[in-house]
Amino acid sequence: MLIVCPYCGVFLNRPLNDGITHCSNCTHLIEVTTKTKFMSLFKYIKSLNSPNVEKIRFETRCDNDEILFVYAFAVENNYSNEEFYNLLNKFFK
């Protein structure tokens, strides 16, 4: 589920499970894919003061594996947005 824009990090008007929407802030067209899910989750985790996996799971309703994957890069390895985006581009061409 996408709750923040994967491009600018602003909360979407309503959470999105599947389909297409646009961001009212940056006007990007957003399609729900694995890549955009990870990007959105990364932006959301980075915006939290003290990220907690259980809280993230409750609020995003994402799978535990997805959360732990993104959490590892966002919190434990402290990747920047650009580093994480480049990593995802290697996986999802």
Image (cartoon, rainbow, N blue to C red):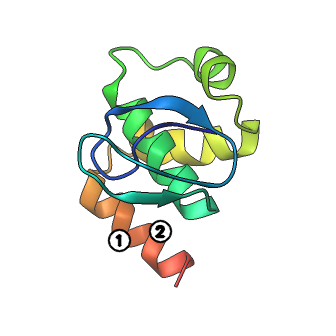
Q: Position of residue 83 (x, y in %)?
A: 30, 62
Q: CA distance from mark 1 to mark 2?
A: 5 Å
Q: Is residue 53 left or right of residue 74?
A: right
Toward which corner of the image does residue 75 lie, by quadrant? top left
Locate the N terminus and report the quarter of the image it occupies. top right
Vertical position of residue 17 compared to residue 44: above or below? below
Amino acid type assigned to the residue bearing label 1 in the image = Asn
Q: Nearer the viewer, residue 9 or 52?
A: 9
The residue lying at 39 percent from left, 43 percent from top is 5
Q: Position of residue 2 (x, y in %)?
A: 56, 40
**Above or below for 30 versus 16:** below
Q: Position of residue 54 (x, y in %)?
A: 66, 17
Relative to 2, residue 38 above or below: below
- At 74% across and 36% down in the image, what residue appears? 64
- Disc 1 is placed on an element classified as helix
The quadrant holding residue 53 is: top right
Q: Amino acid at mark 2?
A: Leu
Residue at 69 percent across and 42 percent down: it is: 17
The residue wearing badge 2 is 88
Which numbered dot is residue 21?
A: none
Q: Is residue 89 above or below residue 52?
A: below
In which image quadrant can residue 59 be found?
top right
The residue that disc 1 covers is 86
Locate residue 91, reporting x and y percent: 55, 76
Is residue 9 rendered to the left or right of residue 61?
A: left
Instruction: Tell me whether the residue at label 1 lies in contact with that at label 2, contact meaning CB atoms closer than 8 angstroms.
Output: yes
